[in-house]
Amino acid sequence: MSFRFTLLHTDTNTQARLGRITTPHGEIATPAFAPVGTQATVKSLDPRDLQELGAELILANTYHLYLRPGAEVVAELGGLHRFMGWPGPILTDSGGFQVFSLAANRRFTDEGVLFRSHIDGSQHLFTPELVIQVQEQLGADIIMCLDECAEPHDRAYNEQALARTHAWAERCRAAQTRSDQALFGIVQGGIFPDLRAQSAQFLTGLDFPGYAIGGLSVGETKEQMQAMLDITVPLLPADRPRYLMGVGAPEDLLEGVARGIDLFDCVLPTRLARNAALLTRQGRINIRNARFERDPAPLDEDCTCYTCRHFSKAYLRHLFKAEELLAYRLATLHNLHFLLQLMRQVRAAIRAGTFQQFRETHLTG
């Protein structure tokens, strides 16, 4: 089965959309949040956990898997789905952001990006052609073009990076050989409205099956991010999925959905969980806080996740204070359930025509 996006309904009061993405490994109801499994694993969880949580799409990362264990190893062992035991849809990022944020001594040229591994210091050159080859070996359902993620406030750098990102998008399109993978272009341009519009116009001209918005949530304000979405999203085709990369705070998901975003991913819920920060309707709480030492209540009285149905705040605090491994697992289960349940509620509200009220209620508490 090939890749297809079906737009089912658009909200009358906002730009929120209800849709369905069909991939060779299953369907994704949108708007959707995708847990991040950077190194072919969502930290502390297994695929059965993710299925029980209701996740329909997960991410893995080209940069990390290229360095370790190597795309050839994954391909030899049957591709990413078989390698990690996940039967559903997978998206792989191109690794451009990881080069920007992790790699040492990186140097961007028109040919590609030269960098040293953050693991062992070895030198590598990512070209658009290599990044597509690696993602074809990994075998994800949705793959991404190589882009250059620039510091959002530097106009001159963003102009240079945008020209390179566009040239690389053309080369990625030309390098793709597998017809069972959907290649998304990535809109860049920092916080500059004209560059965002220019990027959207150029990439839509290449007729990708989906479009991502990159270079946000990397240092700009929430107001600036929302302004860039207001400019960019209307310029993207209505019949293609729109993916906001690296955004996962509950309030940002709601604002993104209201502006017509279909897909989100972020390490935020799993990273917070490992640092004892739990998502609740009343906001984030630090479960290490002394006030929870004798608290017999669950994290959230209304939450139906495994953690909240079986354990108290006092027990979770104990696990974190004792540095028990179960702490990370239970916290991760809760945080991912929280966001995946939020997206189920969002879809139901769009379907019922009540999304605007739902959004206002959640944003005001």
Image (cartoon, rainbow, N blue to C red):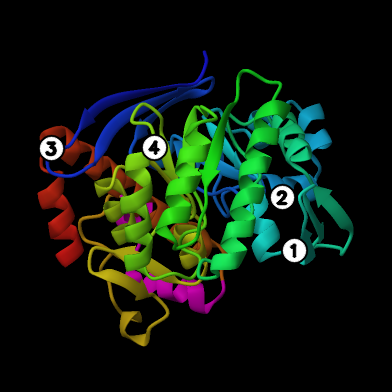
Circle 4 sits in a helix, a strand or a loop, which is it?
Answer: loop
Tell me the quadrant of the picture where the C terminus can be found.
bottom left
Magenta span covers which residues?
305-323
Residue 167 on image: x %, y %: 66, 41
Left or right, residue 122 beside residue 241: right
Q: Main secondary structure of the magenta part?
A: helix
Disc nearer the start of the sequence (1/3): 3
The residue lying at 26 percent from left, 36 percent from top is: 17
Q: Circle 4 sits on which residue?
A: 236
Q: Amino acid at mark 3?
A: Thr
Q: Circle 2 sits on which residue?
A: 63
C-alpha gap between disc 1 and disc 3: 44 Å
Q: Circle 3 sits on which residue?
A: 12
Q: Nearer the viewer, mark 4 or mark 2?
A: 4
Circle 3 sits in a helix, a strand or a loop, which is it?
Answer: loop
Q: Amino acid at mark 4?
A: Leu
Q: Circle 1 sits on which residue?
A: 103
User: Is 24 situated above or below 184?
Assistant: above
Q: Who is closer to the viewer here, 213 or 178?
A: 213
Q: Amino acid at mark 1?
A: Ala
